[in-house]
Amino acid sequence: MSIYSKFFVAAGLGLSLGLGSVSATAGLLNYNLVLAENLTGAVHVEGMTFVGGNLVSTQMSEFNHKDFTPEGSFDGLEVAGNVSGQMKIMHGETAVYNTKSAGAQIDCVGSVNCTTGGVNLSAKKTALTNEMSALASSYQGLSANASAVFSGNQVKLKYTGSDELAVFSLNAADVFFQNSGIELDLGLATKAIINVAGNVDVTNTNLNGAWNYSNTLWNFYTATTVDFNYMAVRGSVLAANANVFDAAGFDGSLYAKSYTNSSLREIHGFFWTPPTTETEVPEPSILALLLAGLGMIGFGRLRRR
């Protein structure tokens, strides 16, 4: 999906859900990895990366690994703090950062010089962090229309309706228990938002069956810790307030407070694309009603003119 179509999809989501804050996430959803704070470990990220804290690459990391960064519009890697370790910026993309350790090595693959230091990214950090929180809150507020079906240690996330979007509301301990297997059955739906409450500590959990990676989003909206313990993650992960630890890899994007791994992990460019059809949401707040009323008054005045 091009950068332009992603902008329109995100804007459409804000209109269709009646949640103005969501439409501001167009920037966020174009990234393959966004962290409000530190990245510690080694990664191969297929698209764009933003690190709001420090980047400590413990092995050779590669950014824009599959050339999914929109050329000429964004940097393949942006680090608001300090960069240390070894890394490559692939396919002629650029890297910007605030500071760099003396021994840090940033190789440019496809360009002579791709790096720029001394860049202040604090404003972008604030904007992306706010967008993560707004998106998590908006999705958490959606009414659940799908449920989990349990059979022994097997969990089937099942949707039986006819809408485009399946929304699940789960507790982490109910599905991420020891030796559990989780399967997704969307039925007629084409996209799934899986809202999960609580911290996650995976103990030999597997995600089974066929998953449409780009159409699945895990929203760990209350978590402060998400430890995947080498589970292969299918779908994108939104954990706005969580420190995320070791996954065997991500078939989707990761948006979190921080990410730490103990060995090289890949983050594949299966980008989450929000739905555009209307979905039931909770009653709007008094402030939202007031703003809507003011908008109608303004519209009426324009018509009279």
Image: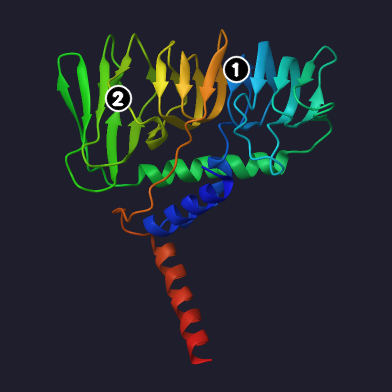
Query: Could you tell me which secondary element the residue under label 2 belongs to?
Result: loop
Q: Quadrant of residue 129?
A: top right
| Badge 1: residue crowd in 10 Å (few <14, some 14–19, many ≥20) | many
For mark 2, does the 10 Å Cα neighbourhood hold few (<14), some (14 to 19), or many (20 or more) residues?
Answer: few
Which residue occupies 75% across, 16% down? 84
Q: Residue furthest left?
A: 151
Q: Residue furthest bottom?
A: 305
- Residue drawn 59% across the image and 33% down it: 68
Task: Say which of 191 and 1 sits in front.
Answer: 1
Q: How is the image coloured?
A: rainbow
The first of marks 2 and 1 along the sequence is 1
- Count up the numbered dots: 2
Q: Is residue 101 above or below residue 139?
A: above
Q: Position of residue 208 (x, y in %)?
A: 29, 18
> Can you see residue 25?
no
Among the 4 quarters of the image, the one containing residue 237: top left
Q: Is residue 17 left or right of residue 112?
A: left
In percent of width and height, residue 150 lies at 16, 22
Looking at the picture, how far across and down is residue 250, in whole percent? 47, 22
Circle on res. 210: 2
From the image, state whether disc 2 or disc 1 is nearer to you.
2
The answer to whether residue 195 is above or below residue 202 is below
Q: Which residue is mark 1?
A: 43
Quarter of the picture containing the C terminus is bottom right
Secondary structure category for the residue under label 1: strand
| Of the pair 164 and 90, the residue shown nearer to us | 90
Q: Amino acid at mark 2?
A: Ala
Work out whether 256 lies above or below 57.
below
Report the residue at 30% width, 24% height from top.
210
